[in-house]
Image (cartoon, grey):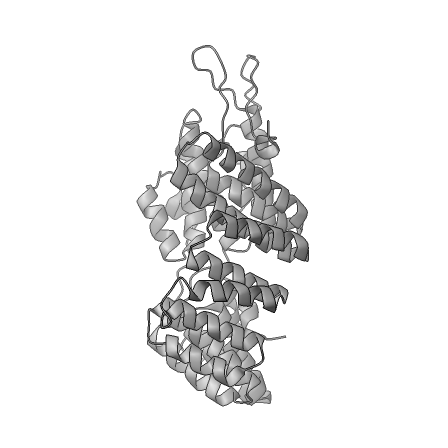
Amino acid sequence: MSSLLSGIRSLSPQSPIDTLRPTLNDVRLFVPTPLTDALDDLVHAHTPSDRPTPRRDAPTPDTFAGHTHSYDILNQYIVGSQWRALALASEASILETPATEERTLLKLWTYRVLALCSLGHYANAAREIRRLEVATTSAQVYKNGRSPTIVWPFELRVLRAQVAGLAMDDWPLCADRLSSLLRACRRQLACQTDVELNQQRTVRLLFMLASCAVRMRDAQLAVRVMDHIVTESPNDPRLLSAVARLHLQLGSIRQAELQFMRIEQLVPSDDKLARMNRALYAVASGKYEAARELFNSVAGDAIEDRVCAANNACVCDVYLGHPQRMLDALQKLMVAAPRAAGASEELVFNYCTGLDLQYDGQKLREEKARKMVDVAMWAGDGFNTASFKLQ
């Protein structure tokens, strides 16, 4: 049996139920959830007391305790980036769900771990996962005279792999767990089970494994994984584009160019994906003016493309020595799309980089405090306040 299920299978021999052993809904599995909001604290610390600040909701455990919350409600919290509410609602739902409903409980645990990771509480997520592993191993669920195997949902196993890197900086362990998941998906494909679903999961896991290899600074592993992605989806422009961009991240400009040329044969020359790829290649080649023009040619499309293109165009402005032009363009985009752009950590980081280049002293502090207030109006929980570059 693969290491995929190592430590998360129930015991097979029958034995009397030990009430001291944790169940999947045991209150002892939980670590207290920090309910403070770093962005709210930062705004109040850097904004004069006479200046109004946005009111940010602060959920309390009492609001959620004693209730089972539907998946629709939990998903609404995800859409709104209400990660503290999701953590509390999923915990309350777990505690109110009978211990015999293992599938439901494990799905609720997926929400719980996702919330902790989205809040940046990786150490707490790791502790709860370890406790959940023990509880799963110890689960005594008897049906038809036997104790069946309890298998974690795919998304929970993915989170378990990611937490190894995020909480413990153990990216080799993360890679090992992702590899185990990948082998499991390929076994399913070999049996012709849920082919489309497992194909999608396989490609997703390969990209995650490539990113993990980049974290490990293992360029050879990253290239091998990307070769597998190309083999899995040789004619998918979006996947090939993602592979090419990973090559750029590794500094393999020639390999990226080969993939970009391959994509050009699969899409029309005016396709926005092709334009974006040309712009990224121009940046890697040091042709910032040409790259900026190409990025701006994408800016009229969907909001996600506009945010990505504008962010890259602004990076070009920095290299071209025009920080004020970058600030003006970013501010215009943030006002036009406050939730998608104004609360984007990457855009806020670049905006604050422009402020660092353009101002200093009291003026710089005032501009950053003003931006904090703007962001606090739209950002959800877990916003990375390092984006403001206060140190």
Q: Please say if 210 is above or below 359.
A: above
Please indicate whether residue 304 sits to the left or right of residue 4 in the image. Answer: left
In the image, taking residue 299 as reference, residue 213 lies left or right, namely right
Image vertical order of residue 208 relative to residue 37, above or below: above
- Which residue is depicted at the point 42% across and 43% down? 90
Question: Relative to residue 157, is residue 277 depicted above or below?
Answer: below
Tell me the quarter of the image containing the N terminus.
top right
Snapshot quadrant of residue 358: bottom right
The quarter of the rendered structure image containing the C terminus is: bottom right
Residue at left offset 47%, top offset 39%: 154
Q: Quadrant of residue 305?
A: bottom left
Give the x, y percent position of residue 145.
46, 10
Q: Quadrant of residue 52?
A: bottom left
Q: Could you tell me if residue 301 is visible in this image?
A: yes
Q: Nearer the viewer, residue 373 or 184?
A: 184
Q: Residue furthest front?
A: 265
Image position, residue 135 (x, y; %): 55, 29
Q: Is residue 344 left or right of residue 45?
A: left
- Asked if residue 339 can be seen in this view, the reply is no
Q: Position of residue 113 (x, y in %)?
A: 50, 45
Q: Is residue 147 above or below residue 229?
A: above
Residue at the limit of the structure toward the top, as seen here: 145
Q: Position of residue 233 (x, y in %)?
A: 46, 50
The residue closer to the viewer here, 293 or 299, is 293
Q: Residue at x 42, y 59 (%)?
A: 237
The residue located at (43%, 11%) in the rendering is 144
